[in-house]
Amino acid sequence: QITLKESGPTLLKPTQTLTLTCTFSGFSLTTAGVGVGWIRQPPGEALEWLALIYWNDDERYIPSLESRLTITKDTSKNQVVLTMSNMAPEDSATYYCARTMRGFDHWGQGALVTVSS
Amino acid sequence: DIQMTQSPSSLSASVGDRVTITCRASQSINIYLNWYQQRPGKAPNLLIFASSNLQSGVPSRFSGSGSGTDFTLTISNLQPEDFATYYCQQSYRPTITFGPGTRVEFK
């Protein structure tokens, strides 16, 4: 059974850095073709893909936010970490991590992050 | 960047209806197009990958087609649990983009 779970702060102040951890089980991020990505969704709005890291350490970022994002993996801990710097109120959203092989086929439950002074 | 559009943005339908949602890419993405269903308060669920392949466990009333820039998701015999928002997503590297979503509402 494949599971993913996001963890991190629920409330941040503007300009702070967000660090989210995705802890997964039931698959390995050393298997060819496997990746783990981050997707966010502001309340009542559409999904927005942020970043993705593949089994071979290939990293991909949404161009509009690339300067603020870093994605890393720790295969020994089965974790993927996303950092996003200089958070602003408009970054308030539910942040999901998801596995990809052929589409994002398994998702975490999501973590609601609010940015407010 | 590849931009995705969906039409309509919302639609009203009844149980038993056949529903078609269209997704268009700003440039050719071959068949690198996936479809998701999202119910309120839940994570998205993969329905179709690579344009026309039904994800394991997804009912056969869902189908997808298309290639290049134009794609379609069809739901035949709409069921009560199908009232949700549907998103297309392109995976033509190097980056990924979701469409704006189509909300299927009860008529």
Image (tube, helix red, strand yellow):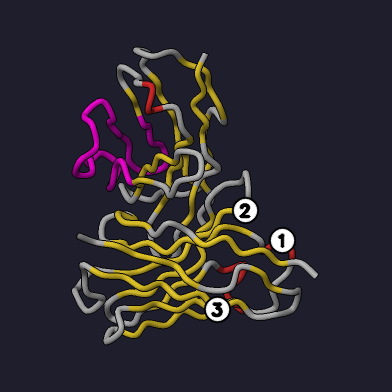
- Horizontally, is A70 left or right of B80 in the view? right
Residue at image coords 74%, 74%: A13
Asked whether the residues under the numbered discs 2 and 1 touch, taking CB atoms below 8 Å apart as contact, a structural biologist would say: yes
Give the amino acid at mark 2. Answer: Pro
* Residue ID for mark 1: A90
Q: Which residue lies furthest to the right in this view?
A: A117
Figure check: A91 above or below B72? below
Figure check: A99 above or below A16? above
* Residue ID for mark 2: A42
Residue A103 is situated, as x and y percent measured from the top left of the image, at 32, 54
Could you confirm whether marks 1 and 3 are on the same chain?
Answer: yes
Spatial separation of the CA atoms under disc 1 and disc 3: 17 Å
Q: What element carries label 2?
A: loop
* Residue ID for mark 3: A19
Residue at image coords 52%, 31%: B103
Q: Give the range drawn in magenta.
A: B46-73
Comparing B4 with A113, the one in front is A113
Spatial separation of the CA atoms under disc 2 and disc 1: 8 Å
For disc 2, the chain is A
Q: How crowded is mark 3: few (under 14 residues within 10 Å), some or many (20 or more)?
A: some
Q: Say which label, 2 or 1, has the lower sequence index.
A: 2
Residue A53 is situated, as x and y percent measured from the top left of the image, at 38, 74
Residue A41 is situated, as x and y percent measured from the top left of the image, at 56, 54
Marker disc for residue B105: none
